[in-house]
Image (spheres, grey):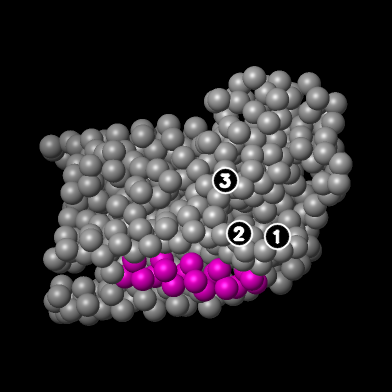
Amino acid sequence: MEPRGEVFVLGLVLSIIVLVISVMISVWARRFTRNLGDYYVAGRSIGAVNNGLAMVSLALSLTTFIGLTALIIEGVYIAVAVYASFTAAFIGLMILAAPYLRRHKSFTTMAFISERYGSKSLRYMSVVVMMVVSVLYLAGNLKGIGIVFYFLLGVPEVVGIVVGGLVVTLYVTLGGMYGVTYNQTFQTIVLLFCLMFPVAIVLRTLGTSGWFFPPLGYGDMVPDMISFVPHYFWAMLEHPITYIAIFLGSFFGIIGLPHFVMRFFTVRDAREARWSTVICVFLVGLVNTTVYATGFAAVYFMQTSAGVDLTPAAYDYMVFILVEALAGEGWLALAVAGSVAAGLSTVSGLLMIMGAGLIHDLYGEMKPEVDDEKKLKLSYLAMFLVGVFVILFSLNPPEFILKAIMWSFGIAAAGLGVPIVLGIWWKRTNKYGVGAGMVVGSLIGFLGWIMIDYMGMNPVDIPFPFFAKYLYGPMGWIKVTVLAVTFSFILTIVVSWLTPPPPKELQRQVDEMHGWPDYDERRYNSKGLPISILVVCVFLLWFMTTLYDVFPK
């Protein structure tokens, strides 16, 4: 895509205002940071509304604002699965993890895994998985900030990546979790306003009667859309395992993504954790359906407007193109500011968890004699260095934002989500099983990314014995998530069964997370749950090998 040809002054002004306010919030919030607990988990003092809004800003990154719209254009039949699974994942997070993680009173995902299974080795391993997941997630979102700057100024994307990355690094380093939380709340409000209103104006311009409520505002265009793109509402154009892969990655990936989990350690109690998730689920569902309406309008616009012929590489810009063409520059400026807020909020959460993982979970475990005051000082340095590292890594960004994010979800699901879920719901899970499942599951996802995305290999040609043949189709690469998650579950359960059970003091944590005042060995220790999971996993691996001749290669 070519730049606009001139500096978009109004959009630039609003974007600068968002950036300046973000830094000012962190400077203000720094006064509340007096110790390590304040810096990492905001003193566990955040309320449900504030935390829920902050969680929304983590979920509604530039992946949602830009990347999902691009996917709707690129693969209309699969976009429904993405945003529906993503919304459902938060319900799973609320039911399976949120209140129980809060009762555990850890600082991070890595600390939870280490303390639940009584293993320093698992802490180190989970830090490595966290870093891989976070860097992939950050690369996609920093590319999104680069896209915004390219659109605003016509400068290369790397300029936006460097500037946006440095601003976020500054305010995360200054404000810690207090600064991150209040910034994410502010950025959620900005994002909601700057997405809903421009999309409503776009739908009104296209002549829809329900434009005032964007999630359902495209109804009048459905008959025409069916004539333009007959398969738009028929999703099963790929093997169903593709959609199962999206669901598994989203469902267990949300639970495993450490910057999401960290939000539950900041609230006052388990009740606040549950209600913050309810708020998040509602708003995420509202925005995801609005984004689908945006993608719908974009496809409709491209089909009905002469001269609109974009290359797939330009689809990430479609939100801006659509708003500028149908709503005008004033609304475009709001959309640009909203996208900046979306990018900043997610990047800040990721930098926070990466810095916490390096100092609290890695350095703190290796040097337990170091006092909290020194750890706090080192945390400031770690945040800054992590920010610089991620900026350098992101100078070679992924082609599509959403692809990097989906890889990170799959790795997080297999490497972190599985140990968290089983650690909460099955007492027999032990460190040996978690170690086996974490290593194999996360390696399958990571090596898949290396070979397919980084080295550019065709998915069906990668050296995954037996299964590579079935990674065909337009999004065949995402089926790697099925392999990663199922093997992680299978190995964790089987190895845990074949090795000694964890000590009772570790099993007691499960009862405590569920709010029981006493310990009962029979609770959460039946064979029904692990056997059911094994049956489902084996079925999915078999199902992946079926219907080979039915769907296009």
Query: How far apart are labels 3 and 1 at the CA level?
Result: 15 Å
In reply to whether residue 80 is colored magenta, the answer given is: no
Q: Which label sits on residue 151?
A: none
Q: Residues within 10 Å of mark 1 (few under 14, many from 20)?
A: few
Callouts 2 and 1 close, C-beta under 8 Å: yes
| Total numbered labels placed on residues in the image | 3
Q: Amino acid at mark 2?
A: Phe
In the picture, measured across the screen, residue 286 lies left or right of residue 322, that is: left
Q: Which residue is mark 2?
A: 8
Image quadrant of residue 236? top right
Reading the image, the residue beneath label 1 is 4
Which image quarter: residue 398? bottom right
Q: Measure how far apart labels 3 and 2 are at the Cα level.
A: 11 Å
Q: Secondary structure at mark 2?
A: loop
Using the numbered discs, state the Cα–Cα distance from disc 2 to disc 1 in whole angstroms.
8 Å
**Placement of the N terminus among the 4 image quadrants:** bottom right
Left or right: 548 with respect to 317? right
Q: Which residue is mark 3?
A: 330
The residue at 86%/46% (across/down) is: 307
In front of the other: 534 or 210: 210
Majority secondary structure in the magenta region: helix
**The one of 390 and 84 positioned closer to us in this rendering:** 390
Q: Which residues are magenta?
A: 155-173
Name the residue located 50 percent from the left edge and 49 percent from the top edge.
Answer: 338
Residue 524, position as x, y percentages in the image: 31, 38
Judging from the image, what secondary structure is the residue with disc 1 in?
loop
> Is residue 165 covered in magenta?
yes
Element on which disc 3 rests: helix
